[in-house]
Image (tube, rainbow, N blue to C red):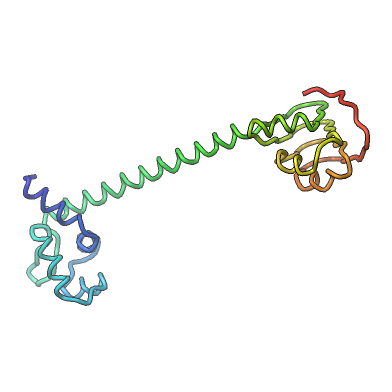
Amino acid sequence: MSQEDVNKIFTALSHEIRREIIRILAEESPKTFSELMNKLDIRDTGTMVFHLRKLEGLVTKNERGEYVLTDLGRRAYQIMNQIKTERKEEVKEVSEKIIEKREAETISKTMIISDRLNLYIDKEFLENIRSSGRKLILRDIVNLTISDDIDPNLFNEIVEEISDVISIRAPKKLRPLIKLKSRDVLTTEQASLFRAGYIL
């Protein structure tokens, strides 16, 4: 392909209307001047003539006076599709990277404690998690005890989820929040005094 042909293709593909003309002539039957205008929703004949002139060498007329693509026009159509495919792949790749990054950020900002027989959570522990900029998820715990020194606002801010817990012992002031954040909890008991006898 000569440099002149390359220039013609770049000129053709540089405008949306010309790209659409190439697409229509490649994917549909040959079109008359008025059929192309209707397909493109162009009302001004001067605009149509201008773009067809810019497509010289890529578009020609057949024996019936209809517009068709030349070999160079078909090459331009192939390049258009190749660019479109590459863009889709680039967008997909970028999207996947963004999703991976967000998932990694979510994981790094969340502390998950799971598979414990006994777990005791107090104010100091939640404040340490808050100071590290993370949230807390509690899963698969047999006995979960929550200290009565925990402020409901602190609990609500730090604890994201409590799931698959057999028994929760917690002060009355935290029970509405625990109910909101819990899933698959067998029993929730109220108690006013706790011993910090459980270790993480």
Front residue of this view, candidates 83 and 171: 171
Q: Residue at x 55, y 37 (%)?
A: 103
Q: Is residue 87 left or right of residue 160?
A: left
Q: Looking at the rendering, which quadrant does residue 113 occupy?
A: top right
Q: Residue at x 85, y 33 (%)?
A: 147
Q: Looking at the rendering, which quadrant does residue 138 occupy?
A: top right
Q: Is residue 3 left or right of residue 18?
A: left
Q: In x, y percent, where is residue 50?
A: 13, 67
Q: In x, y percent, where is residue 118?
A: 83, 26
Establish if 42 lies above or below 147: below
Picture mark count: 0
Front residue of this view, candidates 176 and 22: 176
Q: Is residue 133 left or right of residue 114?
A: left
Q: Quadrant of the C terminus?
A: top right
Front residue of this view, candidates 176 and 114: 176
Q: Looking at the rendering, which quadrant does residue 139 occupy?
A: top right
Q: In x, y percent, where is residue 185?
A: 81, 40
Q: Residue at x 45, y 38 (%)?
A: 97
Q: Is residue 166 left or right of residue 161?
A: right
Q: In x, y percent, where is residue 39?
A: 26, 71
Q: Residue at x 7, y 69 (%)?
A: 63
Establish if 20 lies above or below 38: above
